[in-house]
Image: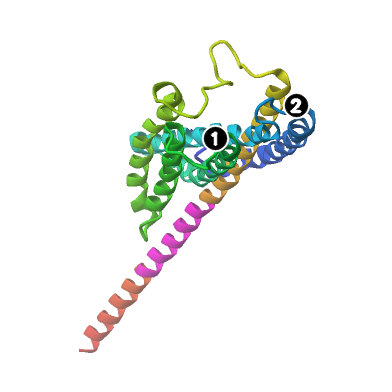
Amino acid sequence: MHRFANPGRFMRVADRLQPWLLAGALGFLLVGLYKALLDSPPDYQQHDTVRILYIHVPAALLSQGAYIAMALGSATFLIWKHPLGDLLARSAAPIGAALALICLVTGAVWGKPTWGTYWVWDARLTSMLILFFLFVGYMALANAFDDPARGDKPAAILAVVGIVNIPIIKFSVYFFNTLHQQSTLMRRDGPSMPAEMLTPLLLMFGFFTCLFLWLMVVRLRGEFAKVRLRAIRSGVARRADRRARRNGGDAAATEGARG
């Protein structure tokens, strides 16, 4: 991380990555939508509503990945005082919040025809809602002070503590009585869904992954720019303060000489 903490070096790497990530996202999206909407078969019970999973599942997985990135960045900042860790966490938070919200909304839309209700206080649904609130809480705490640096440490502590919610999300369907089905994708014996559904799901996961990484690069560029702008403003303010003190001292000396 030290290697890429230099803003100039990071910007050069970001400039190379951005077009490839955007092109990858668009490619995965076009092929994935075709496979998901036109090529994959309807489910024998849920019919065409099952197609929601091609958005719901990748959003759920990437929102958890975003939180893990945020927690790791925060831990790096707390342990090694590395500023890039804080910038990484600040960049991941709004993206993760948006993905968690997409997961919750699509889950509600999917739940109505499947379960007969938009929402139940199910272990999986509740832990995902807590994940969304953790993202929102991190952003609120990080930006709660006039001086952005004052919010870095408390927000980082919240992010690290909140990581306990990730395994709860994962294993809630095994440990609790829940309406949510157990994993059909990440299993020891391999995915249990047919290839006609697995292929578009993986393509859409590729789209969400490339989109997430592209947005991370964009936001990290913005966070670096904010840091540089604050440094410039701070430097200008310090020079103005020194100039004012020097002018005040010269004025006092002049008055003393006159006296």
Q: In terms of secondary structure, what is the magenta stretch mainly? A: helix
Which residue is painted at 71% across and 36% down in the image? 20
Which residue is painted at 51% across and 49% down in the image? 223
Residue 115: image x %, image y %? Answer: 54, 35
Closest to the camera, between mark 2 and mark 1, is: 1
Residue 209: image x %, image y %? Answer: 62, 33
Task: Check disc 1 and report the residue beneath it.
Answer: 115
Q: Residue furthest top?
A: 189
Start-end of magenta stretch: 225-241
Residue 175: image x %, image y %? Answer: 39, 22
Residue 73 within the magenta-colored segment of the rendering: no
Residue 238 within the magenta-colored segment of the rendering: yes
Does residue 259 appear to the left or right of 17 in the view shown? left
Is there CB contact under 8 Å for labels 2 and 1?
A: no
Does residue 63 appear to the left or right of 122 in the view shown? right
Hey, which quadrant is residue 253 in on the image? bottom left
Which amino acid is tagged 1?
A: Trp
Does residue 68 appear to the left or right of 221 in the view shown? left
Identify whether 2 is placed above or below 188.
below
Q: Nearer the viewer, residue 86 or 113?
A: 113
Packing grade of label 2 (10 A; few <14, some 14-19, many >=20) is: some
Q: Secondary structure at mark 1?
A: helix
Task: Check disc 2 and report the residue beneath it.
Answer: 41
Q: CA distance from mark 2 to mark 1?
A: 21 Å
The scheme the figure's colours follow is rainbow
Hey, which quadrant is residue 208 in on the image? top right
Does residue 4 appear to the left or right of 191 in the view shown? left
Residue 245: image x %, image y %? Answer: 31, 72
Q: Secondary structure at mark 2?
A: loop
Which amino acid is tagged 2?
A: Pro
